[in-house]
Image (cartoon, helix red, strand yellow):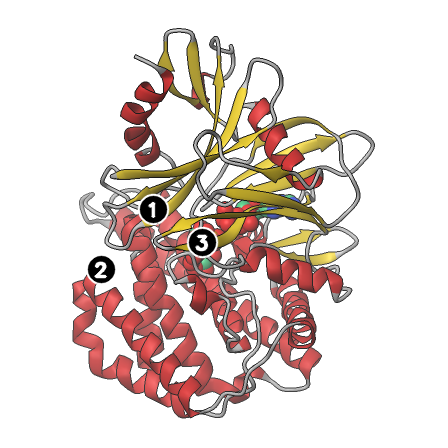
Amino acid sequence: MTASEALRAALPAWMARQRWYTGKGREPRLEPVGGLALPGPDGVDVATWLVRDVGAAEPVLYQVPLTVRPAAVPGLEHALVAEAPGQVVYDGCHDPAGAAALLAAVVDEARLGPAGGDDDLGARGHRAGAAVFATGSRVLRGEQSNTSIIFDVADGAPVILKVFRVVQAGHNPDVEVQEALASGGSTRVPRPLGDLLGWWPDGDRRAEGHLAFAQEFLPGVEDAWRVALRALETGTDFADRARALGEATAEVHAVLARALPTAEADEAAREAMLDGWRQRFAAAVEAVPELAARAEDVEAVLRAGAAAPWPPLQRIHGDYHLGQVLDVPGRGWVLLDFEGEPLRPLAERTAPDLPQRDIAGMLRSFDYAAGSATVAARESGGSTKTPAGPAAAGREAGQAAELSAHEAWASRAREAFLDGYGAATGRDPRADAALLRALELDKALYEAVYEARNRPDWLPIPLAGVTRLLVG
Ligand SMILES: Nc1ncnc2c1ncn2[C@@H]1O[C@H](COP(=O)(O)OP(=O)(O)O)[C@@H](O)[C@H]1O
Ligand SMILES: O=P(O)(O)O[C@H]1O[C@H](CO)[C@@H](O[C@H]2O[C@H](CO)[C@@H](O)[C@H](O)[C@H]2O)[C@H](O)[C@H]1O
């Protein structure tokens, strides 16, 4: 068996085990689009492959960087994809030779061609900062939709290279928006260092889209999700940090409104938005059928949001939550990951949108933090199936107190965030309550789909949000 035969046999099962694979619960049915050859060290073949999963409801194009080595490398066992006599295939993001080749393609402004065959396939790197010389790399662990590689850099700050796993035709908003913010003078995003733009055959046309994005890595800082969870655990107030986050959010919105195109919120835009909201509800009902019973109430909230006053549409973050912001000492809040919601089509994610969508996203996230703290407290409090009695009653009372403490924490954080945003813009977001509520509901419905697919244990968190938003 050759390495390519072994790879063809092993790739679907290997992909199905990866965090970035979106077709949970089934193996992909893969059609190769082609590979891009990257210069690698002697004896190591490096290429990044584009493969289409045609088994998905809508075909999904994935990027899979791979290295082929003549022998196994001790320490790379976790990155093994396939093996054949004299050839070992590794995940190219985990193999340091593959990682270095990907970064070099960006910072050396490489032009890449097809790895065999004469496909209409290529890529070019674009450097947006100073040259960097990487000395070592590691893959960032954690809940990620893409694969991020951290590089140590000789005489300089570390670099993070985000390798986009789901590749789509069109410029990736993560690259476009962060480069626009940095060019607009904002330090609220890590300094961009460059990107890799690829093209590939797509039916009878040529598609173009981003394959990777490099930027300054801010080491030793935690995202706000972790900070918030610890604050909840220790009963520490988050209001000051939340207020500063509201101010930072407003600042970023102001730069984006200047730096990138805006659009009028006309009737057509409202109708399209309402349509999108309704489709989202339909998707949520498909994932969580019990939501069908709330159809009338949902429709009323969405309609009220569509009929409310709207500001002009502009570029926004698009998937704003606590996991997307870092509290950087001496710099304040720094925003990450402007890719938008991964479950939405790219065309929607790059269109001018309502800034209130970001506000709603962060408000939901404070609720999420409180919700997850309550789930954790319940789990550590033992099973509710234990016999009733004074101990059980005491435990229940303790849990109720904890629940209301978490709710109070979230409510204070939400209000402080809104205060900060309002103070920076001169308009209190609570003045747009109907619009904000529709967007929070829309986000909670998206989250219900996301959790049903990815983390069913957490589904009750967005469902509680839906209930709250329909009652108030
Ligand atoms: N420039 C950076 N500096 C420090 N940490 C970062 C940086 N970029 C990303 N991270 C960390 O990586 C995590 C995932 O990054 P993100 O851009 O959200 O990727 P994904 O799209 O895969 O979810 C973030 O929550 C953050 O903890
Ligand atoms: O960070 P991503 O772009 O991958 O965003 C997706 O995953 C998020 C979870 O990691 C998800 O966010 C939801 O869970 C968060 C806690 O883990 C919470 O803070 C958010 O408020 C909640 O929406 C996000 O929706 C999804 O697009």
Residue 64, quarter of picture: top left
Q: Earlier in the sequence, mark 1 or mark 2?
A: 1
How many discs mark residues in the rendered view?
A: 3
Q: Which residue is mark 3?
A: 206
Relative side of 39 to 443, left or right: right
Marks 1 and 2 sit apart, C-alpha to C-alpha, by: 15 Å
Which of 245 and 139 lies nearest the eye of the viewer? 139
According to the picture, the residue beneath numbered tag 1 turns out to be: 22
Label 1's element? loop
Q: Residue 176, position in %: x, y?
A: 61, 60
Mark 2 crowd level (few <14, some 14–19, many ≥20, 10 Å Cα): some
Mark 1 to mark 3 CA distance (whole Å) = 24 Å
Q: Is residue 275 visible?
A: yes
Real-space Cα separation, disc 3 to disc 2, in angstroms: 34 Å
Q: Which residue occupies 39% across, 62% down?
A: 344
From the image, state whether disc 3 or disc 2 is nearer to you.
3
Q: Identify residue for label 2.
A: 287
Q: Is residue 69 left or right of residue 455?
A: right
Please state which amino acid type lies under the numbered disc 3: Arg
Residue 452 x/y as whole percent: 27, 54
Residue 320: image location, x then y, percent = 52, 63
The crowd level at tag 1 (other Cα within 10 Å; few <14, some 14-19, many 20+) is: many
